[in-house]
Amino acid sequence: MLLHKIDELRSVRREWAGLSVGLVPTMGALHEGHLSLIKKAKETCDKVIVSVFVNPIQFGPSEDYDKYPRTLDRDTELCQKEGVDIVFAPSPDEMYGGGRLSNDTLTYVCPPFFYVNKLCGKSRVGHFDGVCTVVLKLFNIVQPDYAFFGQKDAQQVVIVKKMVKDLNVPVEIIQCPIVREESGLALSSRNKYLSEAGKKDALVLSAILNNIKLCYNRGITDVSALKETAYGFLTDKHDLEYLEILDKNTLEEKKNADNDSIALIACRVDGVRLIDNMYLGG
Ligand code: PAF
């Protein structure tokens, strides 16, 4: 069932009293990564709702909001095949009203500076305010018992978990593993923008992370030394934005990596900003 209105969603949701409900929040352009979240939601919950909403307030002024792929017919078909109960695809007006979208006029959820002032949050100022605001709105609209997020956006999952804990939101966050192409490239809606050559150049992200993990497994724990191993992989085709090794739960910096560490990378390839990450332990 495809619904666009909050009231319609609420009235169907009311009929599900006593059943467990899972939400998979997405911006559409669904790929195997999203489908893995939907499959996990289907295994875990009686009813599954997938939201498809390209959230304007998480895009910066120079980012790809207008250009972001919108494929609702295909997304709805894929969801139907997976047995999703509701695809919820509101318009920006339905979510935010018709007014100007700014924190002068709208109530925003602002996650702590410590969590946003690093990794993607450093170059995407305000991004995680936009993410937390829409995610909390979706939680309030859908009232799910579980919500499913991909490890691909590791910083996002840590920040959403923190919001849920700090604001006592009664939702359990389930994190699902990254899905990769056979080549190692992590699936992303933005991979569509890559040329064939760009797709090959993009393999550098997973190659760097795999090599860091290999070095860690061989006994190198010094974070600076582990990060330096990346430079052998980078060419003039790669514009590295960050490479960090942090605590996977708290995003704290460490001098020495351990089994709770995560390596995270963002790199622009072929004009496309790509991110990836890998746990060093396990
Ligand atoms: O990860 C995403 O696709 C988005 O950030 C989310 C969680 C759907 C919020 O718009």
Image (cartoon, rainbow, N blue to C red):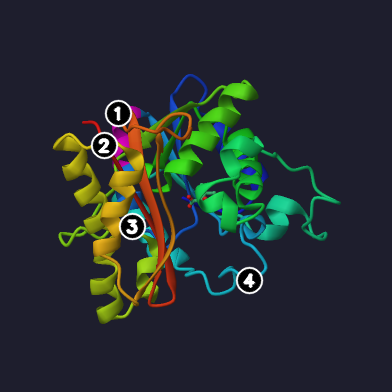
Q: CA distance from mark 1 to mark 2?
A: 7 Å
Q: Which mark is residue 280?
A: 2
> Which amino acid type is marked by label 1?
Asp
> Which amino acid type is marked by label 2?
Leu
Secondary element type, mark 3:
helix
Which residue is identified by label 3? 78
Name the mark nearer the viewer: 1 or 2. Answer: 1
Q: Earlier in the sequence, mark 1 or mark 2?
A: 1
Q: Which mark is residue 62?
A: 4
Q: Quadrant of the C terminus?
A: top left
Q: CA distance from mark 3 to mark 4?
A: 31 Å
Residue 32 shows in the view: no
The magenta stretch spans which residues? 38-44
Quadrant in which residue 32 is drawn: bottom left
Q: Do residues under tags 2 and 4 come within 8 Å of each other at their CB atoms? A: no
> Which amino acid type is marked by label 3?
Leu
Name the mark nearer the viewer: 2 or 4. Answer: 2
Q: Residues within 10 Å of mark 3 (few under 14, many from 20)?
A: some
Secondary structure of the magenta portion, mostly?
Answer: helix
Secondary element type, mark 2:
loop
